[in-house]
Image (cartoon, rainbow, N blue to C red):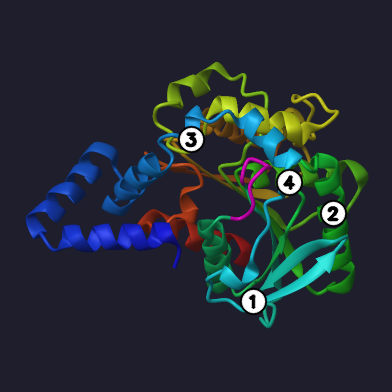
Amino acid sequence: MGKLNKTVVSVTTAVAGVPILAGCYAGYQKLRYSRSAKAGLTELYLNNKYKNFKDIDEKKRLEQQKANNAEELIDISKVEINSSIITKNKDDRAIWYLNSNSDSNIAILYIHGGSYVHNLADVQWQLADKVALETNAEVIIPDYGLAPFYTYKDSYKLITDLYTEYLKENPEKTIYIMGDSAGGGLALGIVQSFVKNGTPLPKGLILLSPWVDLTMKNPEIKKYIKKDPLLSIKALLADAFYWAGDKDLADWMISPINGNLEGLPKVLLFTGTRELIYPDTVILADKLKNAGVNTTFEIGKNLNHVYPAFPIPEAKVAIEKIADFVKK
């Protein structure tokens, strides 16, 4: 169990020990925010953990990381999940396979988020684990290269090659692609490239709070600065600059909201209304529907960025919807 999960459970247990207090808090969250008590506690936790995050000079941090040659790596021995996990390698990058002993014909290629500069957090491992168990699918997680050491070019190639090779080796499998945050944007861009290049498409796309416009120029996002405990415009722009390499931030391969959305497979799209990029996700949903894409848009009222990854009741409902989506 990750630190966040333990913290929320501990606080919930403490509050539950005082029935009147617990009832008042749960009632307040329900009436004021239309969300669960655990969702409220999670936001409090995130606000406290990341209270100084928006003051960090992200460009300076990335330059120092590059100078130190300190790529952010995963110690797989410390990952706490219930699914079986196998590690393979491709082009000197780790590829993790969860639930690979499943007899299901469904596979999910999961592209994690982290602003293109951070590797999987505990909650993302737990998200992948819960999706694997709920769907009984094999979940494939590529350890794609992160900025400032790699750019979009490296990841497009790695993930495209991984996908096409998996298709050839497992013709009986029905494949979905799932991504959260930056990984959601990368997933969308890669599938747009499949449409353009004639690559066989996945059965569907599952996008959780996808970061699809790296220019951050939508004036509406400024209304959500104080609501979002995780994301900062300044930091995201610094991350985007290193990720884009030689591309303009508005290019569709970097900001897939600007690309051609026609011909995409069905999409299951999640967002919360207390996240910085909520306005862009609303625009994406409209564009997908206008392009004729079969789109299911799930809006988590007063929920945070990538809310299906957190230990809250609303996340359980979201994962059940993901399972329904891939089993149709």
Residue at the far front in the pictured view? 68
Query: Mark 3 vs mark 1: which is more N-terminal?
Result: 3
Observer-side mark, 1 or 2, equals 2
Amino acid type of disc 4? Answer: Leu
Return the disc, 2 or 3, that comes first in the chain's sequence.
3
Q: CA distance from mark 2 to mark 4?
A: 12 Å
Position of residue 156 in the picture relative to residue 291 (left or right): right
> Marks 3 and 4: CB-CB under 8 Å?
no
Q: Quadrant of residue 116?
A: top right
Principal secondary structure, stretch drawn in magenta: loop
Residue 133 placement (x, y as % from top left): 55, 73
In the foreground, 50 or 37: 50
Could you tell me the amino acid type at mark 3? Phe
Which secondary structure lies at badge 1?
loop
Query: What amino acid does circle 1 point to?
Result: Asn
Whole-percent x, y for residue 22 in the image: 15, 55
The residue that label 2 is drawn on is 158
Nearest the camera: 58 or 311? 58
Whether residue 118 is in magenta: the answer is yes
